[in-house]
Image: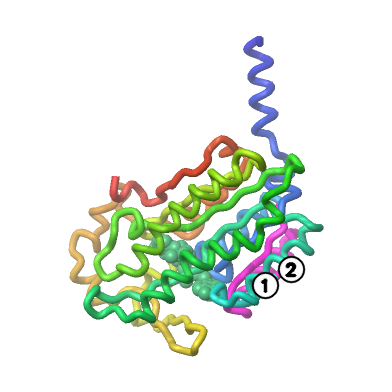
Amino acid sequence: MSASKRVDQIAGHLNYPKGMLVGQTAIITGSGQGIGAECARLFANEGAKIVVADVDAKKAQDVADQINQSGGSAIVAVGDVLDDKYIKELIKKAAEFGGGKIHIIVNNAGYTWDGVIHKMTDKQWHTIVDVHGTAPFKIVREAAPYFRVKDGEPRNIINISSTSGLHGNAGQINYSLAKAGVTGLTKTIAKEWGPQFGVRANTVAFGHILTRLTAAKEAGAFITTPDGQKVALGIPQARKAGAGAAEQHLDIPLRRPGSATEAASAVLAVASPLFSYVNGQTISVTGGRNM
Ligand SMILES: NC(=O)c1ccc[n+]([C@@H]2O[C@H](COP(=O)([O-])OP(=O)(O)OC[C@H]3O[C@@H](n4cnc5c(N)ncnc54)[C@H](O)[C@@H]3O)[C@@H](O)[C@H]2O)c1
């Protein structure tokens, strides 16, 4: 092949004047705020139809409204990923919205409920393992009929993990196990649904990203468990202040935390055709931390 023809082919491959995700429908869990909301906006900019899935009805609606007002297309699906009934509704609603198709799932919903090993309760353990591990499994299982298809269109599953899952983190034994499990979940999907159906599955593992999960606990953010217990979110200032090197971000080669937009941009990259041959991988988005 001549060099110029090859360049033409590459240019064609990279040329998406109407957006890289046109014609695709994406479910993004936990997209009412933080990284998920940024994913929703960035995916919508690339032409995807977005299902804003979140337990927080108001925030989810705000994200969807903003997308629709800027010329994109989004609906909300409000509920808790720990609720089996909600998972069924979510997939049904998404498939209807997508004209019978779902192309992308970003399993992003989640939170932390920290405690040292000897004080961690069974409830803390099971809630966090279920939110980050069991719920993504059940969502993917429910969506199987829309991914085990041969229509020649791309299919992508992206599961969100954390450096806590890859390296462990003191005070987060529940979250570390769950986020470590995400990598096995991803690879199994890639191995089961890649060969016949061309489904790609990847994990994106974040380091320190600026959202309410890493903000001061004293700011008062909380999430409510299905049985009504309030779980405070964020990192206690005392722990931050005592962190020394971590406080100055000396553990991060880029010497700063990432923004939610930077985190979401990496998810978009993985979902995009530019990553069409990247499969079963764990992509660290950490500013170089834990190299
Ligand atoms: N922020 C970080 O530094 C960081 C680092 C590593 C991994 N992560 C992961 O990234 C993902 C997004 O976190 P974030 O920092 O954007 O948090 P966030 O709190 O800003 O946003 C999370 C969203 O998920 C929703 N959510 C939580 N539990 C839910 C449930 N059970 N059902 C439905 N919706 C639910 C919340 O309502 C919220 O809108 C999480 O999986 C988190 O564990 C974040």
Residue density around tag 2, few if under 14, some if 14–19, many if 20 or more, within 10 Å: some
| Side of 42 relative to 187 (left or right) | right
How many marks the image carries: the answer is: 2
Q: Disc 1 marks which amino acid?
A: Ala
The residue that label 2 is drawn on is 93
Depicted 225 relative to depicted 265: above or below: below
Q: Nearer the viewer, residue 85 or 7?
A: 85
Where, by quadrant of the figure, is residue 117 drawn? bottom left
Q: Which residues are magenta?
A: 48-75
Helix, strand, or loop for circle 2? Answer: helix
Residue 275 picture location, percent across and down? 56, 39
| Side of 206 relative to 32 (left or right) | left
Look at the image and say whether residue 224 sits in the magenta stretch. no
Q: Residue at x 37, y 72 (%)?
A: 215
Q: Disc 2 marks which amino acid?
A: Lys
| Side of 11 relative to 281 (left or right) | right
